[in-house]
Amino acid sequence: MTGPRDGGREAVGEQSASRRGRFGRWRDQAIALGWLALVWNLLWGQISWANLASGLLVGSAVLVFFPLPAVTFGGRLRPWALLVFASRFAAELVSASLHVARIAVQPGCRPRGAIIGVELRVRTDLNMALTAEAVTLVPGTLVLEMDRESATLYLHVLDTHGPAELVAARERTLALERRIVRAVGSAAELRRIDNPPVEKGTSP
Amino acid sequence: MIATVADWLGAACLVAGAMLGLAAAIGVLRFPDSLSRMHAATKPQVLGVLLLLLGIALRLRSMADLGMIVLVAVFQLATAPVAAQMIGRAAYRSGRLDRDLLDADELADRGSGGGSAGSG
Amino acid sequence: MITVLAVVLTALLSVTALLALARLYRGPSLLDRVIAADMLLATMIAGVGAEAAVNRHATTLPVLVVLSLLGFVGSVSLARFAVREPA
């Protein structure tokens, strides 16, 4: 009894997904156009109607002549979580910078490093890109490679003193991902983050 | 009063930014291999430039210039990790890293990639 | 105060640029030189910006925008070149 109903719901969902896909694509383009127009206004140093019009013109020319693969933004912005992410990001940026600066000026210190792989839990391109950017900017880590299939980031960690710090770096990266998903992720991604499926042993 | 405070804060930001840049340069000069140098070149330097921009904003104090300063800061934050990742990947793939300084290498354990390139 | 600030900033940035130049000269590989050149460009951004802040004018701010994008384009294209170049 549940079978057909589920199937029907799935078909309906698929249909609405495709309609939302077209609408979403249109919406993505509009958002990109808005950002480009804003950048144009900032470049001119003042926001005026003439700048807005020329910005929209230039922005649409850029979007038409340099089409990029669409990055669908499936989630929604949560201002409070975004604020939490931004403040933690700033704090980690400062502490990581001071740490690296201290290593740099400390005499006779030859920092050791390590390369670790961290598997992200949310596999969208947007999440991978955002996490990789943030990870490269913050604590003592630098993204070397990304595996898009398994959503794994390979990081170079600076100044390690043993396996415990590698575990700590991995956890820091996952915590960063959680904050990013809380800030911009969709509800399904948020569920994935908050109660991760226990599949370490079963999944290949 | 507020103007004086903002001036002094701006001056402090400028000096702090310049000092972070100096520390980054020392790191770039002293660190033993390319990957460690990347660390010095991305982190303290980005924060240094951001502090400097904050100092400029605090001393100029006009909305029109603030827009352009924010734009430079956003460009820095968005482009520095991308450039760092590309240089880091190039350094790893061409095997230009000191394996004696690595505690672990899970990328080489993965099998593919330039795992054997480092021994040459 | 302005004079002291200008002198301190000039000294710090000059030393930074010299260190970056030293790495640019010594760098064993192309990538090290790319890193050093990036560093040098960031120092230039700092220098232009510091001058604008000390003298309180905004005429050179567009230069900052151009420099910050130039560094990115330069490093990315050189990194791609370095991957193709053997050893």
Image: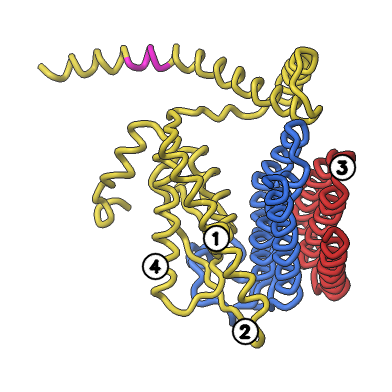
Residue placed at 85% from the left, 38% from the top? C62
Q: Do labels 4 and 2 share a chain?
A: yes
Which one is nearer the viewer's eye here, B4 or A165? Answer: B4
Q: Do labels 2 and 3 share a chain?
A: no
Horizontally, residue B19 falls left or right of residue C19, namely: left
Mark 3 crowd level (few <14, some 14–19, many ≥20, 10 Å Cα):
some
Tell me the number on the disc at residue A167: 4
The nearer-to-camera label among 2 and 1 is: 2
Amino acid on which disc 3 is placed: His
Residue A4 visible from this viewpoint: yes
Horizontally, residue C20 falls left or right of residue A170, namely: right
Which one is nearer the viewer's eye here, A100 or A19? Answer: A100
Residue B90 visible from this viewpoint: no
Q: Name the residue under label 2.
A: A109
| Image hue for chain A | yellow
Secondary element type, mark 1: loop
